[in-house]
Amino acid sequence: MSDAEAHCLERKWFYPFQLPSGRVTPTYLAPEVALIHQTRLQMLQAAVAAHFGQPLPASLSALDLACHEGWFSQHVAAMGFESTLGLDARAEHVADARLVAAACGAGNVRFEQCDVHAADAATLGQFDLVLCLGLIYHLENPVGALRVARSLTRGLCLIETQVAPGLSGWIDYGHHSFVKPIIGSFAIVDETEETHGPETSTTGICLVPSLDALLWILRKVGFARAEVLPVPVGGYEQLQHHKRVMVAAYA
């Protein structure tokens, strides 16, 4: 057992990493909640296979925005992407991701500290696959983050998010004779007392989109089309019951 693997086994993680010895990192999520990881992964793998084909073409690149401990980054790299970059705003997440990647021997993945709003296509370039999993409902500027995601996407962007109840109808827009349709809505969620948490917002103000809002915004920021992906049988309950969605957006 390597020193890196031994260090990984000394603590609990958000994700269950399969280590070279065959052991799995202990996790702090309840089993019924941890199912979300496998459901997201199944949906991600199916979307990648449908878009890029099997086997994957050579020289594909991937970007994992808000990569956390790098679990999805590692899985994408293992699928056959030539290069995978994980970005996260928290320095401790980047350190954790580097540690466990070293323990797992994942050589074609790297991690850097960067807030999603600071990610710049002029510097980073574009990627065949961009992941935006479990991120935008923790942001006070989700539209800006989706603009960034679009600028970084050359092929496919996968967005997994909590969604809020929708609001529809018409609104008087300055005068009763001038009305506009409500395209979608956002729910405000307060995480201002939880910004110390590893899976929460860094600012505390969270805008959670309705599904209609999310799909409309994806088109408006420049994606050619967007579709809600099917949930596998036995998948995580929030995805099954439409409280969360994974959307494929195509450049």
Image: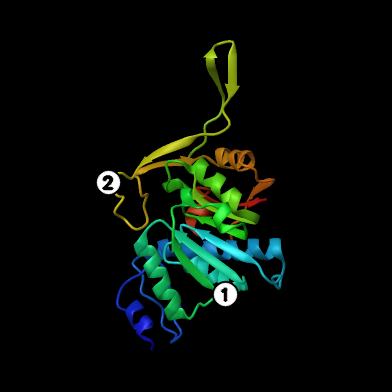
Badge 1 vs badge 2, beta-carbon distance below 8 Å = no
Q: Position of residue 2 (x, y in %)?
A: 38, 87
Q: Nearer the viewer, residue 117 or 77?
A: 117
- Is residue 50 left or right of 109 when viewed as pictured? right
- The residue drawn where x is 34% and y is 83% is 6
Comes first in the chain, label 1 or label 2: 1
Q: Nearer the viewer, residue 29 or 78?
A: 78
Q: Nearer the viewer, residue 54 or 30?
A: 54
- The residue drawn where x is 42% and y is 48% is 138
- The residue drawn where x is 51% and y is 46% is 145
Give the residue at mark 1.
78
| Amino acid bearing label 1 | Ala
Residue 240 vertical position relative to residue 109 in the rendered view, above or below: above
Q: Position of residue 133 (x, y in %)?
A: 50, 56
- The residue drawn where x is 33% and y is 45% is 191
Q: Nearer the viewer, residue 154 or 55?
A: 154
Residue 233 seen in the current view: no
> Secondary structure under badge 2?
loop
Q: Position of residue 22 (x, y in %)?
A: 45, 85
| Amino acid bearing label 2 | Glu
Residue 87 seen in the current view: yes
Q: The N terminus appears in which quarter of the rendering?
A: bottom left
- Is residue 112 left or right of 242 when viewed as pictured? left
Residue 64 vertical position relative to residue 103 in the rendered view, above or below: above
Give the residue at mark 2.
193
> Secondary structure under badge 1?
helix
